[in-house]
Amino acid sequence: MNAQTALKPAKAAPKQVLDAAASCFMEKGYAGTSLDDVARHMGATKGRIYHYFSSKSELLHAVRKRAMEINFAAITPAFDSEEGPVEKLRAMARAHALNMMREQAYQQALFDRLNLHITGGNRADRDVWREEFMSDRRAFEDMFRAVLAEGQASGAFKIRTLSYALHAVITMLNSTISWYRPRADEPENTQAQIADELVNMTLGALGVNT
Amino acid sequence: MNAQTALKPAKAAPKQVLDAAASCFMEKGYAGTSLDDVARHMGATKGRIYHYFSSKSELLHAVRKRAMEINFAAITPAFDSEEGPVEKLRAMARAHALNMMREQAYQQALFDRLNLHITGGNRADRDVWREEFMSDRRAFEDMFRAVLAEGQASGAFKIRTLSYALHAVITMLNSTISWYRPRADEPENTQAQIADELVNMTLGALGVNT
DNA sequence: ACAGAAACATACTGATCGGTATGTTGTCAA
DNA sequence: TTGACAACATACCGATCAGTATGTTTCTGT
């Protein structure tokens, strides 16, 4: 068993488990979801879950890890572009806003237990992956932070306290997970429209007149 | 037993239960909190809780009801003022933002299960108080909606889609519950400063140049 | 003074759920 | 062909927890 084998991309089965878990966590919350719920959602039993994950909290961790990967992948192209801060932020914000609407299940799982990590939370959950997760989150925020700082320095953004502005921006872009739900009968471009308006308001909040 | 007696303001004991519940729900979430936890937090036992509330979900409902009362009380004075839409929104937004930082425990309980009501959620919880709660929430949002609509009509606000703007505004003002925690060593005016900056960014998002 | 009700505490139960131990079936290399 | 392991399913256990049944004490009106 070499590195090639070990790092083989996730096969179908584990991904199915992750999807089912993310979906259940979104609907009923982490604590409110039993592993039997997750199994039933796949048309399987607990045996399948425990074959790939050693505990419920590890399953949550895997869902969150996947969610973070999705988030990084969404904004990295825009971040690596050669644009100035305003256009770069616009592209990143738009990509992130769209991403939040497309991957609601994983994102919801991300936010569910996040608050419990800020405060106390359960001991068993906290110990294991807290550090890794916080550092991922910080790395993600830092990408936005860098762009905001650049725009602040160049005078493109009117920012008083950078950390407050950062929180406000990210919160606004994340906001759809708490009020938007895709509907079958909605127009094709609904998500794009929402994203555009959120991006415009975000830039307005930073003093960029559109 | 007349109306006077029935509507007597809550005595000390039930309020203590509510405070303990709100505090526990904030720390560990609703599903993650046992009634023994709540009782222990008061230095009491379950008997005391069940003397005032008939079930766990009724306790949550009571916490949320109290949270909504607090929220209405915070913004009503500003809403009833004779100011124009910009200044009126500024005052309401500031009052709400401060309120969110001062009453974190109750607000957190409000948001915890809120998402589960948007989607499916537990049947037992849902049935009973869903309608009442959604209507309270809508009434609260309508106060902001009215001011936004007024400012949109007068041209003071640049708003494309009112419902999106409303969500964005409220989300931004609520955002502190997910990133701000009061610290003992923070300057006296920290909360006021945060509130002011959030309000400025909110107005900026609506196209008001500050 | 005392009856009864309010305000709890104590002790228990039934159901749920995370986790484990064990069984069953397909697959694949030697 | 066979045996060894992967990929599950089934059955069960122990802990937790919402809810209840039943005390016990303090107040309160008469």
Image (cartoon, coloured by chain):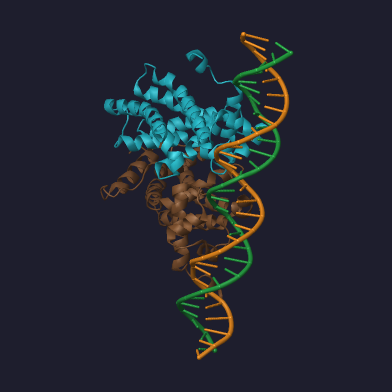
Chain colours: A cyan, B brown, C orange, D green
Asked whether A201 or A147 is in front, the reply is A147
Say which residue appears at 62% left-offset and 30% top-offset: A48
Can residue B206 be seen here? The reply is no
> In which image quadrant can residue A203 be found?
top left
Can residue B100 be seen here? The reply is yes
Please, is residue B95 above or below residue A103 in the view? Answer: below
Q: What is the x, y in percent for residue B181?
A: 36, 46
- B195 horizontally vs B124: left or right: left
Say which residue appears at 39% left-offset and 22% top-offset: A88
Q: Which quarter of the rendered picture does the N terminus of chain B lie within?
A: bottom right
Q: What is the x, y in percent for residue A25?
A: 56, 38
- A11 horizontally vs C9: left or right: right
Number of marks in the rendered image = 0
Q: Which quarter of the rendered picture does the C terminus of chain B lie within?
A: top left
Please, is residue A45 above or below residue C14 in the view? Answer: above
Say which residue appears at 42% left-offset and 25% top-offset: A90
Q: What is the x, y in percent for residue A64?
A: 49, 31
Q: What is the x, y in percent for residue B114?
A: 53, 46
- D2 horizontally vs A160: left or right: right
Say which residue appears at 48% left-offset and 32% top-offset: A197
- B63 horizontally vs B207: left or right: right
Asked whether B83 or B48 is in front, the reply is B48
Please, is residue B195 above or below residue B158 in the view? Answer: below
Please, is residue C30 above or below residue A65 in the view? Answer: above
